[in-house]
C-alpha cells in the first residue's frame, strides 16, 4: 500500500474514533450503561469492544503483540461474552476506557506505517468498517433510548428538498452477476462472489416509501387488519402492541414522530424509517405491491440496459450513478442530515434505470432471507455472517447514518424481521411486471 493509501486508512481510523466521541459526548455514566435491552449494548462496553477488534485482529492475531491487559478478552470479546452479561462486567470507567482506545489507536497507526503488509492493511480496513457499523449502532441506540440529538450535523450536506417521486421504472430481464467481483477491492465474505442469476422483467418504484405513502395505511387501520399480515408478522404485531410505527404518536395537531429526544410533525415527503420487515410486508399487501428480491434490488441499483433496452447489459456499476464515490449530491450518508430527506431529492443519485437514492437515506428491506452465495467461505471473523444465515432478512443500500466510505451496491446487511429500531425502510415492486 502506498504512503497515500496508508495515510488515508489512518485518517479513516481517526475519523471513526472522532465520530464515536461525538456520539457519546454529553452522556452521563448512567446513560453510558443504559437499560438491559436485547436490541442495544451498553455504550461503555461497546466503545471498548470496537477498539478491542483492532487490537485483537491487527495487533495480536496478525502482528503477534501481547494483549493490552490480562483481562481484556474477558471484557470485550463479543463471541464469548453473552449479550445480557455485558451489563454485569467489571468495566473500566469512561476515562480508563478512552485511555485503552487511545493506546490501541496509536499502536495500530504505528504498525500501519511499518512497511508494506497487505494482510495487516486488510485487517485494519476491516476493523475501520466494523467501527463504522458500531457507530451506526451507537446512533440508533441514542434513538432507541431517547437520548439527545447527537452533535454530528453539518447543515446543507444532504442536498436540497425534492418532494415526492411517484411511479415505477420497468427493468428488462436477463442474466445478471449478483455479488461482488475480485476487482472490487475490499468486500465482506457474504458478498463473495459474483455469480449469474436469471432475472425476469419487473417494475420497481423510483423512490423509497415515504411517510406520506405509509400514513394512509396506518389511518386505514392496516395495523388492525389481520388480512395484511402473515402469521408470524401478526403474532409480532400483537406482542409489540403496535397500532402504528413505534416512534409515531397522534396528537391534536396531527401525527408526530420522535427523533432522538424531540417530537416533530411527520416529514411526509421523507423516506419512512424505523419500520420492520413485517410492517413493510403488511404495507405491500395493503397497497397491492411486494418487496423486491435481493437480486432485483441489486439489478435496479447496479445494472444497465443493453443497447436496445430489451435486456440487461453485461456491465455493472459500483454505485447507482456510476463508479465515482458518493458525494452530497448523490447520497444522504455520513450522519450529517440527522434523518431521512425527501425521497425525490438528489436526482444525481439516479441509477441507470431511474431509481433514486438506492444508496443512503434509508436501509431498504428486501424479500429475501439472508443466506450464503454459492461457494461461500467465511472470512477470518467467522461470526460476521454465517450465524445469521437463515434467520435474518437482507437489507440493502445504507441509511443516512451509514459512512460513505464503506457502502456500495453489493453491500448486504441483515436484521431480524421484527427489528424496527434500526434505520430501515423499503421500496416496492409491482406484483406483475
Image: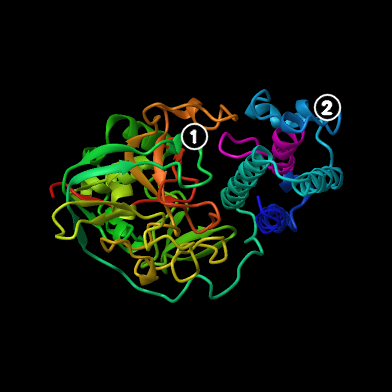
The answer to whether 161 is drawn above or below residue 50 in the figure is: below
Bin the neighbour count of mark 1 within 10 Å (Cα to Cα): few under 14, some 14-19, many 20 and up: many
Per the rendering, the mark at residue 236 is none
Question: Mark 2 against mark 1, which lies toward the viewer?
Answer: 1
Q: What is the distance, in whole Å, between disc 2 and disc 1 at their CAs?
A: 30 Å
2 and 1 marks in contact (CB < 8 Å): no
Of 46 and 195, which appears nearest the observer? 195
Main SS, magenta residues: helix
On the question of residue 224 being in view, the answer is no
Of 398 and 408, which appears nearest the observer? 408
Q: Which residue is mark 1?
A: 189
Mark 2 vs 1, N-terminal side: 2
Is residue 164 part of the magenta span, yes or no? Answer: no
- In the image, the segment drawn in magenta is 33-59
Residue 306, quarter of the rendered image: bottom left
Q: Which residue is mark 2?
A: 71
Of 355 and 41, which appears nearest the observer? 355
Q: In percent of the image, x 45 and y 71: which residue is there?
A: 329
Taking the view exactly as shown, the residue that stands out farthest to the top is: 80
Where residue 233 sits in the image (x, y, percent)? Answer: 33, 35
The answer to whether 183 is drawn above or below residue 255 in the figure is: above
Where residue 161 sits in the image (x, y, percent)? Answer: 41, 75
Horizontal side of 247 relative to 431 (left or right) equals right
The answer to whether 114 is drawn above or below residue 71 in the figure is: below
Amino acid at each position: 500500500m502506498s504512503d497515500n493509501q496508508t495515510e488515508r486508512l489512518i485518517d479513516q481510523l481517526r475519523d471513526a474514533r472522532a465520530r464515536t466521541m461525538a456520539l457519546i459526548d454529553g452522556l452521563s455514566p448512567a446513560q453510558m450503561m443504559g437499560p438491559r435491552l436485547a436490541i442495544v449494548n451498553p455504550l461503555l462496553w461497546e466503545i471498548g469492544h470496537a477498539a478491542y477488534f483492532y487490537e485483537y485482529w491487527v495487533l495480536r492475531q496478525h502482528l503477534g503483540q501481547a494483549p493490552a491487559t490480562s483481562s481484556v478478552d474477558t471484557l470485550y470479546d463479543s463471541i464469548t461474552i453473552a449479550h445480557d452479561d455485558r451489563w454485569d462486567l467489571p468495566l473500566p470507567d469512561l476515562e480508563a476506557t478512552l485511555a485503552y482506545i487511545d493506546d490501541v489507536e496509536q499502536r495500530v497507526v504505528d504498525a500501519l506505517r511499518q512497511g508494506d503488509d497487505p494482510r495487516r492493511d486488510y485487517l485494519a480496513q476491516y476493523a475501520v468498517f466494523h467501527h463504522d457499523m458500531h457507530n451506526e449502532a451507537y446512533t440508533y441506540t441514542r434513538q432507541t433510548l431517547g437520548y439527545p440529538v447527537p452533535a454530528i450535523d453539518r447543515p446543507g450536506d444532504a442536498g436540497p428538498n425534492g418532494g415526492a417521486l411517484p411511479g415505477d421504472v420497468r427493468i428488462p430481464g436477463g442474466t445478471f452477476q449478483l455479488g461482488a467481483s475480485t476487482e472490487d477491492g475490499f468486500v465482506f465474505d457474504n458478498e463473495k462472489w459474483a455469480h449469474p442469476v436469471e432475472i425476469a422483467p419487473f417494475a420497481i418504484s423510483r423512490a423509497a416509501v415515504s411517510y406520506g405513502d405509509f400514513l394512509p395505511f396506518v389511518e386505514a387501520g392496516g395495523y388492525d387488519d389481520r388480512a395484511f399480515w402473515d402469521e408470524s408478522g401478526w403474532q409480532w404485531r400483537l406482542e409489540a402492541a403496535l397500532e402504528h410505527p413505534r416512534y409515531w404518536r397522534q396528537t391534536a395537531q396531527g401525527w408526530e414522530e420522535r427523533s432522538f429526544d424531540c417530537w416533530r410533525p411527520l416529514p411526509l415527503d421523507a423516506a419512512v424509517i424505523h419500520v420492520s420487515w413485517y410492517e413493510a410486508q403488511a404495507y405491500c399487501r395493503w397497497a397491492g405491491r411486494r418487496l423486491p428480491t435481493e437480486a432485483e434490488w441489486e439489478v435496479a441499483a447496479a445494472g444497465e440496459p443493453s443497447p436496445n433496452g430489451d435486456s440487461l447489459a453485461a456491465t455493472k456499476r459500483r454505485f447507482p450513478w456510476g463508479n465515482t464515490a458518493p458525494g452530497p449530491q448523490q447520497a444522504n450518508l455520513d450522519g450529517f442530515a440527522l434523518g431521512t430527506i425527501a425521497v425525490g431529492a438528489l436526482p444525481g443519485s439516479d441509477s441507470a434505470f431511474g431509481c433514486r437514492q438506492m444508496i443512503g437515506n434509508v436501509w431498504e428491506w428486501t424479500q429475501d432471507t439472508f443466506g450464503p452465495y454459492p461457494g461461500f467461505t467465511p472470512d477470518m471473523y467467522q461470526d460476521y455472517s454465517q450465524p445469521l444465515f437463515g434467520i435474518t432478512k437482507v437489507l440493502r443500500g445504507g441509511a443516512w447514518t451509514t459512512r460513505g466510505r464503506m457502502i456500495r451496491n453489493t453491500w448486504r446487511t441483515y436484521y431480524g424481521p421484527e427489528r424496527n429500531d434500526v434505520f430501515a425502510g423499503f421500496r416496492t415492486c409491482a406484483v406483475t411486471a
